[in-house]
Amino acid sequence: MSDIQKNISDKQSGESRRRFLRKLGMGALGFSGAGALLGACKRMDEKKEPAAEGAVPTGMMTMRRNRSTGDNVSLLGYGCMRWPTKTGDDGKDVIDQEMVNRLVDKAIEHGVNYFDTSPAYCQGRSEAATGIALSRHPRESYYIATKLSNFAPQTWGFKESVDMYRNSLKELKTDYIDYMLLHGIGMGGMDAFRARYIDNGLLDFLLKEREQGRIRNLGFSYHGDVDVFDYLLANHDKYRWDFAQIQLNYLDWEHAKETNPRNTDASYLYGKLDSFGIKAVIMEPLLGGRLAKVPEHIVSRLKGRDPLRSVASWAFRFAGSHPGVLTVLSGMTCMEHLEDNLRTYCPLVPLTDDDNRFLYDTADLMMQHPAIPCNDCKYCMPCPWGIDIPGVLLHYNKMLNEDNIPQSRQDPKYSKARRAFLVGYNRAVEPVRQADHCIGCRICVQHCPQGIDIPAELARVDNYAEKLRRGSLPG
């Protein structure tokens, strides 16, 4: 048994997140994004955002054609990074397979046929859970997308990476992959890309697997260094990419680089793919939920334009309205979110030019008070010092969205906002896991796909909370 297979076998027997991290060598990795091996799952008892109501249509899913293989792909794709969890008999969180099966059944019943997973997701459990759920349906009724997630340097060898690929086939209960991705190219720059896929001969191997039909479509997902993205497209004649996965939403369309200098605006990424005729698979249409949890004045703005649609539906319509998009991924943990997205895409009502201008203006308004660009992917977790990093950052964003970040004691809402921030902070994050325990080790920074300076943001939140506690904001 290979080291990777043994790691996965050990993980499936119930090892802790922290032990799983150590066994894969994640603690000391030196390039961004390696923490993706700890993709997030969600508990079913988490607070849900309101969705639009109404019957969920059947037989009306908008489909997109992949010219490479002729596949008719559902515009709504199922992202399998956030499968629901429950408490197991040993008191630890496990994937709620029964609920996963129900979600997959509902999705397929309403036309969803694209399911995106990875060996990295859900502490390595996503592929197995996805395989169990999908294998209950005819193989020709769905497309499986997975990734070569060889982030850790000890998996960069040819044998180790091929073992990971073959284990994906086993976990997914299939003898071919419909959509195989090089995972997270750009993270770590060109040197990491070459070490993971070129120097070890792995990309040549994957190209041969495509020739032999065990991979039907070959592509890549992109984060980070745009030079790697440009290099892969410049060599499109050599590699013949069938698709590529990019982050696209109405905030990142023109503001991604403004939010974070290491990011690339979605308008550039999409435009470049479109110029090569390469279909785009969309990730983060909601920016990890941030575009479903917008400030109240933005909620009023969106609802004022269309009161019957959910806030989230605007983001999904924006992503899906681009004709070069093959499918839009959503990590739907609960049935309510699946049903809302089905309403949006069964069928899609494309945005008009006026709708797009409305959303561009909405994005401009949101950038006046930018949130911390945390997508709640939990790639930064577990923190070796026990800090609930996403919990801290998302609490700050929530308070910002609810206008509970007073800058002065003269603010008319100061007392109410101060209480909301401090009481809410203690409820959202245990005091022993709050930002004041950060020592600035910066391990988390290496793992963040968004390139957030996490220690700096934690220090900012802690400094603000301490000023509220002491009543030391300006008078």
Image (cartoon, rainbow, N blue to C red):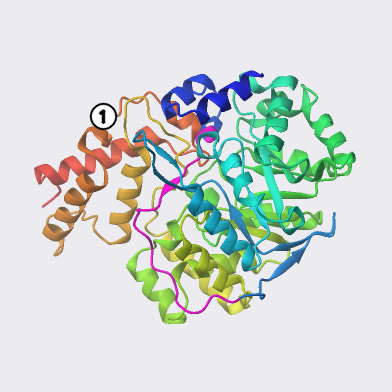
Q: Is residue 458 left or right of residue 246?
A: left
- Residue found at x 86% / y 42%: 213
Q: Report the front residue among 96 and 115.
A: 96
Q: Which residue is mark 1?
A: 437
Residue 456 location in percent, x, y? 35, 35
Q: Vertically, is 391 above or below 279?
A: above
- Quadrant in the picture for the N terminus: top right
Residue 248 falls left or right of residue 258: right
Name the residue nearer the viewer: 146 or 234: 146
Which residue is rendered at x = 38% and y = 23% of the image? Answer: 441
Does the segment drawn in magenta span residue 50?
yes
Query: Which amino acid, mark 1?
Result: His
Q: Residue at x 31, y 24 (%)?
A: 439
- The residue range painted magenta reads 36-57
16 in magenta: no
- Which of 348/58 is in front? 58
- Left/right of residue 383 with respect to residue 278 in the rendered view: left
The quarter holding residue 466 reads: top left
